[in-house]
């Protein structure tokens, strides 16, 4: 299994509070991604990173920000959590050096906003 | 705009059957296609990746094929087992944009003993 961890694994928070989710990889992969997964919508890309300090928006980026100060860490921040952000959040990594761009996923974080 | 469709959305079969899961995509200019498995409450596990120049990939009882011209991929599972019960997702990486996968909604498979 790819060395990807996510923390916390579960979190309950109140509307309006800031929340930060962490993704940590030990594979030295260039690309990192944050997805959310909701019933009926499948996997939707929030933000991704193609290198340290290089990030770009995905299809559902409103209300989320990211940072990547080290190759191994990719942080997702909900500045002011809303109930619509209750979801399961997955981090993924991929690498371009082998030309495969195969994506590997972390175990997920279940976030509930009350 | 690339769209990925998986049919059927759900499938229930008796143990031992050979089965085929389908994935179709609208734009044939893809870089690769990836099949994943997701168990309930778990993350996604990469099963097979087919590059655009390849026609199929095999891993154990799994065989994935790719027909770019028709915009189709199939995942063949031989001699299905209850442990194969999971959701299977396919995703394509578009040529020229090798950073973001386009996802199908998945096929939920139940293999009954």
Image (spheres, rainbow, N blue to C red):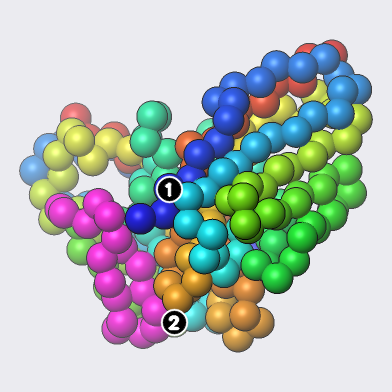
How many residues crowd around disc 1 within 10 Å: few (fewer than 14), some, or many (20 or more)? few
Viewer-closest of A107 and A98: A98
x%, y% of residue B43? 56, 45
Tag 1, which chain? B
Q: Which residue is drawn at 48% across and 50% down?
A: B26
Circle 2 residues within 10 Å: few <14, some 14–19, many ≥20: many
Which stretch appears magenta?
A47-63
- The residue that mark 2 highlights is A71
Question: Magenta stretch: residue A48 in it?
Answer: yes
Inter-mark Cα distance, 1 to 2 = 31 Å
The residue identified by callout 1 is B3
Which quarter of the rendering shows the C terminus of chain B?
A: top right
Expressed as whole percent of the image width and height from the top left, the position of residue B49 reads: 69, 60
Residue toward you, A48 or A99: A99
**In the shown orientation, is residue A49 left or right of residue A92?**
left
Q: Which residue is drawn at 29% across and 60% down?
A: A58
Chain bearing mark 2: A
Residue B81 falls in image quadrant: top right
């Amino acid at each position: 299994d790819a060395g990807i961890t996510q923390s916390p694994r579960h979190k309950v928070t109140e509307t309006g509070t800031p929340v930060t989710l962490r993704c940590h990889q030990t594979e030295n992969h260039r690309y990192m991604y944050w997805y959310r997964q909701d019933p009926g919508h499948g996997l939707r890309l929030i933000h991704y990173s193609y290198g340290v300090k290089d990030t770009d928006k995905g299809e559902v980026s409103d209300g989320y920000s990211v940072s990547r100060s080290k190759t191994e860490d990719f942080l997702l921040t909900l500045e002011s959590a809303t109930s619509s952000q209750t979801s399961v959040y997955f981090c993924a990594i991929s690498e371009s050096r082998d030309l495969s761009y195969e994506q590997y996923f972390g175990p997920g974080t279940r976030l509930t906003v009350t | 705009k690339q769209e990925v469709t998986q049919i059927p959305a759900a499938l229930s079969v008796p143990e031992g059957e050979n089965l085929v899961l389908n994935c179709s995509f609208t734009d044939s200019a893809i870089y690769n296609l990836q099949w994943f498995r997701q168990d309930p409450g778990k993350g996604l596990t990469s099963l097979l990746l087919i590059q655009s120049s390849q026609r199929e990939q095999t891993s154990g009882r799994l065989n994935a094929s790719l027909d770019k011209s028709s915009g189709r991929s199939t995942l063949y599972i031989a001699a299905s087992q209850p442990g194969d019960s999971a959701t299977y997702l396919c995703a394509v990486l578009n040529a020229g944009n090798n950073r973001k996968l386009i996802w199908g909604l998945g096929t939920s498979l139940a293999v009954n003993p």
